[in-house]
Every structure is written in C-alpha cells, then in structure tokens.
Image (cartoon, rainbow, N blue to C red):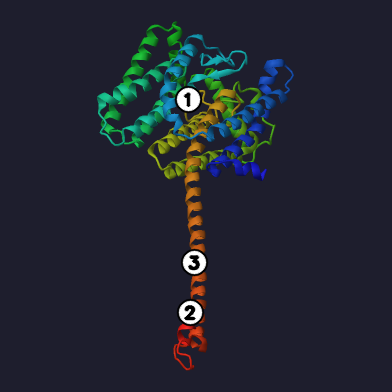
Amino acid sequence: MKELINKLKGDKGIWSFVALLALFSFMPVFSASSNLAYLGHGTGNTLGYLVKHFAHICIGFLIIYWIHNIPYHYFRAISKAGLPVVWLLLAYTLFKGTVIGGANASRWIQIPFVGLSFQTSTLAAIVLFIFVARYLSKTRETPITFKSSLWELWTPVFITLMFILPANFSTTALIFSMVLMLVFIGRYPMKYIFFIIGSGIVFLGFFVLIGKAFPDSKFFSRVGTWSSRIENFTSNKADEDDYQIEKAKIAIASGQIYGLGPGKSVQKNFLPQSSSDFIYAIIVEEYGLIGGLGVLVLYLLLLFRFVVASHKANTLFGKLVVIGLGFPMIFQAMINMAVAVELLPVTGQTLPLISSGGSSIWMTCFGLGIILSVTKKEEEIAQEKLDKEKREEILQKLIDREMEADLEEADTDSKNVNNNLDSDDYSITDNSSNPMNAVLK
C-alpha cells in the first residue's frame, strides 16, 4: 500500500479528500438505492447497485491515475481540436438523446456495444473550460480587443451553450457562470464582461419567448418546466418538484443532530431521485447534522486545496485550468445541497463523487486528473530543485574534502622538505675534502 501511495503524483491533499468522498459515498448509495431496487425488479435488493457504484468509482480512479500522468500542457491543443467533436456530440444528444431514469430531458446518449449512458454536457464543460484557459493564457501579453475575442473566445462559448441550453438550463447557467469567473480572474476587461452578461440575458429571454410561442416543439419543450419550477419555488403551488422538496425537508428534519443511523432512512422510499439528485437529504437523515456538515467541510477543504494548487502553478494556463475545472465541482456540490434545503429550485445537479451515476463520476475524475497533472508538474519542479540543492551540497562536501586532503598533503610535503633541508646530506656547506660533494649530493 505504501508503494502504491508513493506512485501517486500530485497534490496529496486533493488525493486524500477525493478518496474520502468516494469511500463515504458507498453507504448512502447502498441505502438510497432501495427505491430503485423496488421499482426495477421488485425485490429491494440493492447489492447490484452497490457493485455498480463500486465499478464506477474504480473506473473513475483509474481515469484519474491515467490522466494525471499526462503533462497538462498537452490539453491546450486537445481543447481546441476537441470543441468541434463536442459540438457534434451535443447536437446528436439534443436530437437523438435518450431519456434516463424518467427524466424529462434528453441529455444522454447510449455508448454503442457497451450499453452505458453518457451525459455529453459534462465532457463539453471540461473541454470548454480548458479552451477558455488556453485563450486567456495565450493573450496575456497582448492587449485584448472585443472584436477579436468575440470571434475567438465568445463564439465557441455561445455555440457550446446553445447546444446544452434546450435540454439542461441549470448546467448551462453553471457553465456560463464559471466561464465568467474564469475570464474575470484572467483579467479580461470588465466592460466587455458586462456586455457579454447583458447579451446572454437577452438571448435567454428571446429563447424563452420563442419557447412560450411554440410549447409543443421538442427544441423548446423544457421552457415550460423551467417557468413552472421558478413559479412553484416562489409560491405555495404544489407539483412534482414540490413533492420532492417536501420529502427532502422531512428527511433532513428527521435526521436531527446524530441521524437515524446508516441504512435507516425512511424518506429514501419516497424520494424519486434519492440516490442522485437528493442524496444529500438521505445523508443528513441517516448521519444527522454532523454527517451533513462533515460532507460540506470535505468539499470546502477540497476547494482550499484547489486554491493552493492554483497559487503554486508557475504558468497562467495551469492556474486557470485548476480554477476552471476545480471550482465548478464545488459549486455543483453547493447547488445540490442548496436544492435539498430549498434554498434553490430543483436543478437536477448531482453531488460530485457521492451521487450514483457513471458519466458524472467519470467526468469529475477526468477533471481531477487534469488538476493533479498541474500539481504533479509543480511537485516535480520542487523535487528537482530539492535534488539540485542536495547535489550541490554533496558536491561542495566533496570539494571541501579534497581541499582538506590537498592541504594535508601540502603540509606533509612542506615538513619533509624542511626535514631534508635540515639534514647533512642536503647541506650546501662544503665540510668535506672533496669539493664536488655539494654538487653530487
């Protein structure tokens, strides 16, 4: 085990908090999957769901390990070449996507020959964030003009969001907010940012108006759902989302401080998305306020490590990559928790690394692998610096030792010369009868 841990490169704090969240996820998923088990095969046996979640987590950590060994600057070119591929996947998902778990939106595609579903918007978000980081790092030394940035930066951003918006408003809003945060940190001019925000609001309003005019169109079918969720959130009108929120609030209230105990949740049998969207309510019900705050603290500690990793990165691209990929994970977790306690309307955002689901876990691990690749680079630089200092220290010791040996040898030679000079054999004084003795000796 120690050898395996030593092979893991990058920020050890990020590795630790990710592992803790993943390990903790098994009990809530095992407990909350009973509802799916009854609906799926009527037996209530959740062992299959636990094994499936275990497989998802194992594959996720293999993804982290594989990605974190790739130098992160390779993703600069990959992001630019990957955007058109992502657009094709998003377009295919929008028109040919499948409905998973009774969801009202087609957000997934089926992977051929495997039978697994994949949510393409999660991959699109990662590629887009790296693309924005690449642009901001590339234009750091040159003044940014709105005309050039409109074509090189914002056109790809809005094309990506345009493909995601009809099926998933919450993901679109989260991605757009994170892009704005990223360009703000990258010192993009504020006057341009305000203009982009205004343009986004105008485009969204125009999209909603068209959706109201054509409610039966598949492309605008989600507009009515968005409007009803906002109306129900601000009023007391009951609907399906309100039912989920009420059950989540009952679960949270039942947990109190210490919780009912692992596996003893009652509301998991009534919450439709108890193992994914509303798993935080099940966590609080079973583990109490202590468990809920513990999960929150883990995410905050992970956020702190992201800030540290960004600060230590020696390139602007590395800093922006850590922020662009790390912060959305934490904000998504906060949104999930806020929905469970009715601070936000229902959004459909999962709890990263804890909620069940394959593509969401894998894409989160994909982003974590890139972040660890950035920290691994910094770790290698620090290790090289430390090794260099050690080598210089050892070399200096060898030099000092050689100098001491030379000095000792010189002192010995000097003493021998003095002794020889003091002896009669080397005296230049001619005390013999032969005048040639002084020369011969």
Q: Nearer the viewer, residue 290 or 425?
A: 425
Q: Which numbered disc, 1 or 2, marks the residue that appears first in the sequence?
A: 1
Residue in the picture at 64% in, 30% down: 58
Residue 326 picture location, percent across and down: 47, 35
Q: Which residue is mark 2?
A: 414
Residue in the picture at 33% in, 14% down: 206
**Labelled disc at residue 400:** 3
- Look at label 2 and name its amino acid: Ser
- Look at label 3 and name its amino acid: Asp
- Look at label 1 and name its amino acid: Pro
Q: Which numbered disc, 2 or 3, marks the residue that appears first in the sequence?
A: 3
Crowdedness near tag 1: few (<14), some (14–19) or many (≥20) residues, C-alpha within 10 Å: many
Residue in the picture at 30% in, 29% down: 193
Q: Which numbered disc, 3 or 1, marks the residue that appears first in the sequence?
A: 1
- Circle 3 or circle 1, nearest the eye: 3
Distance from Cα at disc 2 to Cα at disc 3: 21 Å
Q: Nearer the viewer, residue 319 or 205?
A: 319
Whether residue 389 is visible? yes
- Circle 1 or circle 2, nearest the eye: 2
Residue 203 picture location, percent across and down: 33, 17
Whether residue 346 is visible? no
Helix, strand or loop status at disc 1: loop
